[in-house]
C-alpha cells in the first residue's frame, strides 16, 4: 500500500470494535486473567499481548502498528516523549566502555542531557563529528552507535545518510537517526541503511501542540527486545490519551505537511530577499548547500527552517519579536501554528565552527495564510530597523 493509504488504514480495527472507526482509548494498569494457567502463561514473544498497563494496551499497539507500517520497520515502541525515545534508544545499545559517535548538529538536549550527562555518567565515551564530512577517522573498535539527525533541527544541514550508514556498518556500529523533521512521510531512514529511527511524535505526528510522545522503530527482533526492555525497565510508557492523539494526528499528516511545505517555501523565499536577512537555512531552497542531497533522498520538506539575520542588537531583536501577532515564541514545532525563537548557534557545537553574520531565528511555518505571516514579519522587520 502507498503511504497515504497506510496513514488512513493502519492502526485501527473497526471489525473488532463494533464498527467504530477509531480504536478505543484503554485506560489500564491492572489486567486480570481468568485462570492460574492464563496468569502464569508466558507469551510466545516477550512483551506480546496485553499484560499490564506499562507494557502497552491496544491503544498503544494501534499507534505502534501505524508508525511501524509507515517506516517499513520490524516493530515500533511508543514512549512518553521524543527525548525519552532518544535516551532509551541510546541506553538500549550502549554500556560502559562503549563509544558513541554523534553528529555535531543534533537537538540540544540530545547532546547535553542524553550524551554529555546520562551516557558519560554511565561510562560511555561520546565524541561529536562534523555532519558534512565522512566519519572514517572518528570510528573506533569500541564504537557501537553512530547517531545522526538530518536535517539538524537548528542548522538544517543534510547528512549523506547512506554514506554514513555504510561506514558505520562496516565498522560494526548501529546507526540511530532522529527523523523528527521529515517524519516517515518525507524520509524513510531504514531504506537508507539506518538501523533505528527515532521520532518526537510530539511534533508533526501529534500535529496540534497538545501531546508529548516519542516513537522508536527498529529493524530486527533483537533490537526490538532491547528497546522494549529498556523502556519497560525505565518505567516509560506513554499515556493512552496521548497514543490516541498521536494516531489521530497521523491521519492528516500528509495533507498538513503538504501545506506546511507550501507555506514555508513561500515565506523562506520571501525572507531570502529581505535586506535584514543574511541567510536562510532550509534545504528545500535551490541555493541551500544541502539541496542536492535533500532532493536525492527526501520526498518533501516540513515547515521548520532557520534564518540568520545581519548584525542587530538584542534590544532591536526583542522589539521585533515581542510585537509579532501571529508568530508566538515557544520551544517545539510541528503543530498547526507558526512559531519563532531566537537561536544561538555558535554555542551549541564543539567540533564544527559556526560563524554567522548576526543572530539566528528558527521559524516554524504553520497553516495560516502565508501572506498574513509575511505581513507580521514585515512589521517586525520595521521595528527591528527602527530601533
Ligand atoms: C529534533 C528533535 N528531536 C527530539 C525532540 C524531543 O522531543 P520531545 O520534546 O517530545 O521530548 C525535539 C524537541 O524539540 C526535537 O526538536
Image (cartoon, grey):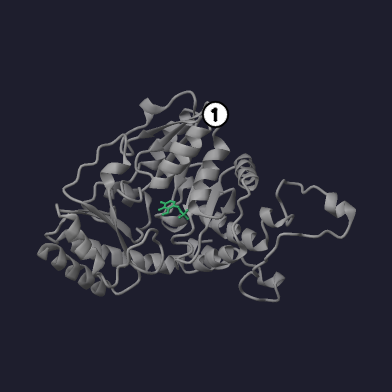
Name the outermost residue toward the front.
315
Closest to the observer, 147 or 164? 147
Give me the residue at 30% from left, 48% from top.
155
Identify the residue position indicated by label 1 in the image.
Answer: 96
Quadrant into which the N terminus falls: bottom right
Residue 103 figure quarter: top left
* Position of residue 99 measured from the top left corner of the image (x, y, whole percent): 47, 29
Q: Vertical placement of 59 versus 79: above or below?
A: below
Label 1, residues with CA under 10 Å away: few <14, some 14-19, many ≥20: few
Left or right relative to 166: residue 91? right
Quadrant into which the C terminus falls: bottom left
Report if residue 192 is visible in the image.
Answer: no
Name the outermost residue toward the right.
36
* Position of residue 191 measured from the top left corner of the image (x, y, whole percent): 47, 46
Give me the residue at 43% from left, 54% from top.
180
* Position of residue 335 measured from the top left corner of the image (x, y, whole percent): 41, 66
Q: Vertical placement of 99 versus 204: above or below?
A: above
Give me the residue at 55% from left, 55% from top.
80
Closest to the observer, 151 or 299? 151
Amino acid at each position: 500500500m502507498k503511504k497515504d493509504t497506510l496513514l488512513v488504514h493502519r492502526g485501527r480495527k473497526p471489525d473488532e470494535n463494533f464498527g467504530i472507526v477509531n480504536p478505543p482509548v484503554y485506560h489500564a494498569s491492572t489486567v486480570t486473567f481468568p485462570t492460574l494457567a492464563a496468569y502464569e502463561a508466558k507469551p510466545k514473544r516477550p512483551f506480546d499481548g496485553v499484560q499490564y498497563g506499562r507494557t502497552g494496551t491496544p491503544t498503544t499497539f494501534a499507534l505502534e502498528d501505524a508508525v511501524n507500517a509507515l517506516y517499513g520497520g520490524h516493530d515500533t515502541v511508543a514512549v512518553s516523549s521524543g527525548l525519552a525515545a532518544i535516551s532509551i534508544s541510546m541506553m538500549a545499545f550502549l554500556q560502559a566502555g562503549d563509544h558513541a559517535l554523534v553528529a555535531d548538529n543534533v537537538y540540544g538536549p540530545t547532546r547535553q542531557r542524553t550524551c554529555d550527562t546520562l551516557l558519560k555518567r554511565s561510562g560511555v565515551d561520546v565524541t561529536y563529528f562534523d555532519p558534512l564530512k565522512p566519519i572514517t577517522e572518528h570510528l573506533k573498535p569500541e564504537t557501537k552507535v553512530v547517531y545522526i539527525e538530518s536535517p539538524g533541527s537548528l542548522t538544517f544541514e543534510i547528512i549523506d545518510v547512506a554514506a554514513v550508514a555504510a561506514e558505520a556498518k562496516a565498522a560494526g556500529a548501529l546507526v540511530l537517526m532522529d527523523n523528527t523533521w521529515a517524519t516517515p512521510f518525507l524520509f524513510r531512514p531504514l531504506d537508507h541503511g539506518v538501523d533505528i529511527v527515532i521520532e518526537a511524535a510530539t511534533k508533526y505526528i501529534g500535529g496540534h501542540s497538545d501531546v508529548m510522545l516519542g516513537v522508536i522503530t527498529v529493524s530486527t527482533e533483537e533490537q526490538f527486545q532491547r528497546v522494549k526492555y529498556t523502556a519497560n525497565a525505565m518505567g516509560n510508557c506513554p499515556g493512552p490519551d496521548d497514543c490516541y492523539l498521536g494516531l489521530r494526528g497521523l491521519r492528516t499528516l500528509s495533507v498538513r505537511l503538504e501545506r506546511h511545505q507550501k507555506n514555508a517555501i513561500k515565506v523562506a523565499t520571501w525572507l531570502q530577499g529581505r535586506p535584514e536577512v543574511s541567510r536562510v537555512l532550509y534545504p528545500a531552497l535551490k541555493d541551500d548547500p544541502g539541496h542536492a542531497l535533500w532532493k536525492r533522498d527526501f520526498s518533501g520538506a516540513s515547515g521548520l527552517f532557520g534564518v540568520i539575520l545581519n548584525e542587530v542588537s538584542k534590544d532591536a531583536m526583542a522589539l521585533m519579536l515581542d510585537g509579532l501577532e501571529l508568530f508566538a515564541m515557544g520551544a517545539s514545532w510541528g503543530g498547526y501554528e507558526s512559531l519563532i525563537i531566537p537561536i544561538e548557534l555558535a554555542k551549541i557545537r564543539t567540533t564544527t565552527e559556526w560563524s554567522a553574520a548576526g543572530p539566528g531565528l528558527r521559524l516554524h511555518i504553520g497553516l495560516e495564510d502565508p501572506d498574513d505571516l509575511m505581513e507580521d514579519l514585515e512589521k517586525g522587520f520595521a521595528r527591528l530597523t527602527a530601533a
